[in-house]
Amino acid sequence: MDFVHGLPRSQYGNDAIWVIVDRLTKVAHFIPNRKEDGVEKLVELYVRNVVRLHGIPKSIVSDRDGRFTSKDWRLVQKSLGTKLKFSTLFILKPMGKLRERTVLWKIC
């Protein structure tokens, strides 16, 4: 999971894209959102765009964005039985494919 920020605001008010890649199928989801969206909105988007299609994941690898490290996000994932894994600045291998797709998406 990662966010692409700094985009011009769309007609719907979105100015960011939440990129989620299923590690098993390599399917990428590009979910429009607002940079200021909180955990409640992200949970709604996550369930509607990811869980509905793929089911509840066993684990999630993300960067240390404040929304993913927040108590609320952790509680939601714990209640779903999903293990959270955070990459660090020095160990980005799990995020490599996501960053690669994000860069490609920005170019295209």
Image (cartoon, rainbow, N blue to C red):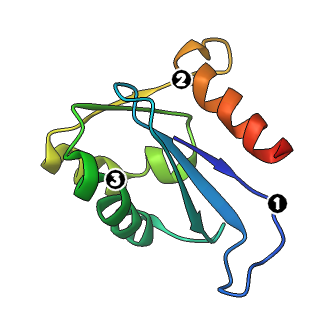
- Earlier sequence position, callout 3 versus callout 1: 1
Q: Alpha-carbon distance for marks 3 and 1?
A: 23 Å
Q: Residue under label 3, please give it.
A: 50
Identify residue type, mark 3: Val
Do residues under tags 2 and 1 come within 8 Å of each other at their CB atoms?
A: no
Question: In terms of depth relative to the viewer, which is nearer, 33 or 69?
Answer: 33
Going 63% across and 71% down the picture, which residue do you hit?
36
**Element type where label 1 sits in the image:** loop
Amino acid found under the numbered disc labelled 2: Ser
Q: Quadrant of residue 54?
A: top left
Q: Which residue is mark 2?
A: 87
Find residue 30 and name its label: none
Q: Residue at x 24, y 38 (%)?
A: 57
| Residue beneath disc 1 | 6
Q: Is residue 10 above or below residue 1?
A: below
Q: Is residue 106 left or right of residue 13?
A: right
The residue drawn where x is 67% and y is 21% is 89
The image position of residue 47, as x and y in percent, is 29, 61
Name which quarter of the figure residue 49 lies in.
Answer: bottom left
Q: Tell me: residue 24, above or below residue 4.
A: above
Q: Position of residue 64 (x, y in %)?
A: 55, 37
Q: Name the kind of residue labelled 1 in the image.
A: Gly
Which of the marked residues, 2 or 1, is nearer the chain's N terminus? 1
- Distance (Cα) linking label 2 and label 1: 22 Å
Element type at mark 3:
helix
Q: Is residue 64 left or right of residue 108?
A: left
Circle 3 packing at 10 Å, graded few (<14), some (14-19), many (20+), is some
Disc 2 is placed on an element classified as loop
